Every structure is written in C-alpha cells, then in structure tokens.
Amino acid sequence: MAGDISALQNAIGYQFKDESLLDKALTHTSSVSERSLSNERLEFFGDAVLDLIICEFIYNSYPDYSEGELTKIKGLVVSRKVCSKIAEPLKLNEHIKVGKGAEKFGSLSGSIAAGVLEALIAAVYLDSGLKQTTELVLGLFKPYIIEAAESQHQGNYKSVLQQYFQKKHGEAPVYEIVDEQGPEHHKCFQAEALWDKKSLGKGWGMNKKEAEQKAAYNALDNLNLIEEDSHSDGQVKNEMTEKYTSSSKKQCKAAECD
C-alpha cells in the first residue's frame, strides 16, 4: 500500500472499525496469488450497494420522472467514468495495492480506481451498515446525480414546475383532469395545474400524462419561467410548443380538443 490509510479515511470522512476490510478493498487482484484475497468480491457487492442507494435517492427525489428518465440518470451516475472522477480527489491511486504488471500502465485513474471505489463502498457497508454507507455515497455522488437529473429536464416540465414550487412555496402543484373529449377509443384529455386552488395553466393531450406535461409547460410559460431568446431556451420553447400544440391539434382534431 503506497499511502497512509488514515489519510484516505479522513478524505472519505469515515473511520473503519475493522481496518482489514479497508485493506482488502484496496487490494487489486494483480497483487495477490489467490483471487479470493483480492477486492473482487467486495467490488461485486459494492456495485449492488451503490445501485440501491442511488436508485432509492433518485426515486424519492424525482417523483415526476418516468422509469425511463430514472434509468438514464442512474446510468449516467453509476458508471466507471463517474467513479473514476470521484476516485481522483480521494487519491485512491496512492492507496491501491497492485502488482508490478499493473504498475507498468502508470496512472490507475480508470477502471481499477473505479473498481476500488465500489469495493470501498462495500467495505463501509460491512463495517457499519446501510445508513452510514448512504451518507458516504450521497456525499460523493450527489453533485453528479443533480447534474444528470438536470439533463433530463428537457421535456419533463412537471418536474421543473414541481421543483420551482417546492423551493419557493414548500409544496408542489397538483393536477386535475378537467375535461375529456372524443370517442372512447380516441379520447383527448385536458389537465389543469393548480396551486393553492389557483389555476397555473391548462393543456390538452392524447393521454393524461401528456396533458399534465402540457399543463405544466403552459404554467411555466405563464409564470415567465421559460425564456424565449435566440439561444437554447428559446429553441426548447419553440420545439416543445410545436410538440404540444401542433401535434396535439392534429391528433385531437376529431375530438375538437384545441
């Protein structure tokens, strides 16, 4: 081990009760004669623990995000690329035990360091349980979660509106289906976004979810929270207006939804 493990424990903000777990987490398979002595099993376990913590956090933090959007966020966050970025300021490379063959490759900031981070997460879990591990993981990964979640905002106006009202008023708007038109096999719905029983905006859609998204978009537009200019915001606004008006008008024409 190249570095002092006390420095690593200070860097992650966690002191191990059983330092042998930390030692094993830092042991790459290239440095031992038997694979069972390496961190491979801990890496396997840590990957699952990391998945659980990140999935629970984004599930609870973004209730209006679809399954597909949550999957994209998780995919962006739970990745070798992000783990490598997190490992760098922790200086994991200085503490990893590797064989001479691995040392020839020089920098270990890629997959090896990322694997060690996952093994480290498993070691903390085995040493102290889920609560302590969750604090550690979120302390390291939350900036990347927020960045990934913000990348999913485009087209998810319910989430944007919710976060605005949660921050400003402490509670989120509610949605009601206030009208529906068309035959049973081709219904069109109108949703209304409400806060404190006041209308924020209405919108039509071919299903209730689409109608709520359109209502949220119109609410944001009514509140002047969507800027229209020559840059990306204006482009998004124009694209989404086209998506939610022209498309809905065409699809709902028979139901006279526009």
Image (cartoon, rainbow, N blue to C red):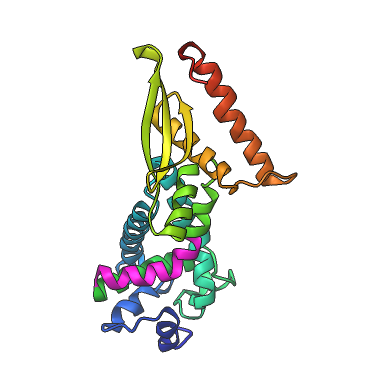
Residue 100: x percent and y percent? Answer: 51, 75
Q: Horizontally, is 232 left or right of 101 in the view?
A: right
Look at the picture and state if 190 lies above or below 141: above
x, y (%) of residue 110? 54, 64
The quadrant in which residue 118 appears is bottom left
**Residue at (33% x, 84% y) in the render:** 15
Q: Position of residue 190 (x, y in %)?
A: 43, 27
Residue 131 is one of the magenta-drawn residues:
yes
**Foreground pick, 153 / 14:** 153
Rendered location of residue 222, percent (x, y): 56, 42
The span shown in magenta is 129-144
| Residue shown at 53% from the left, 53% from the top | 150
Q: Quadrant of residue 240?
A: top right
Answer whether residue 29 is visible to the viewer in this image.
no
Left or right of 150, for residue 66: left
Residue visible at 37% across and 72% down? 136
Front residue of 116 and 90: 90
Q: How many marks?
A: 0
Residue 42: tell me if it is visible: yes
Q: Is residue 53 above or below residue 14?
A: above
Which quadrant is the N terminus positioned in? bottom left
Query: Toward which corner of the image does residue 142 lie, by quadrant?
Result: bottom left
Residue 58 belongs to the span the image colors magenta? no
| Residue located at (40% from left, 67% from top) | 138
What predominant SS class does the magenta segment belong to?
Answer: helix
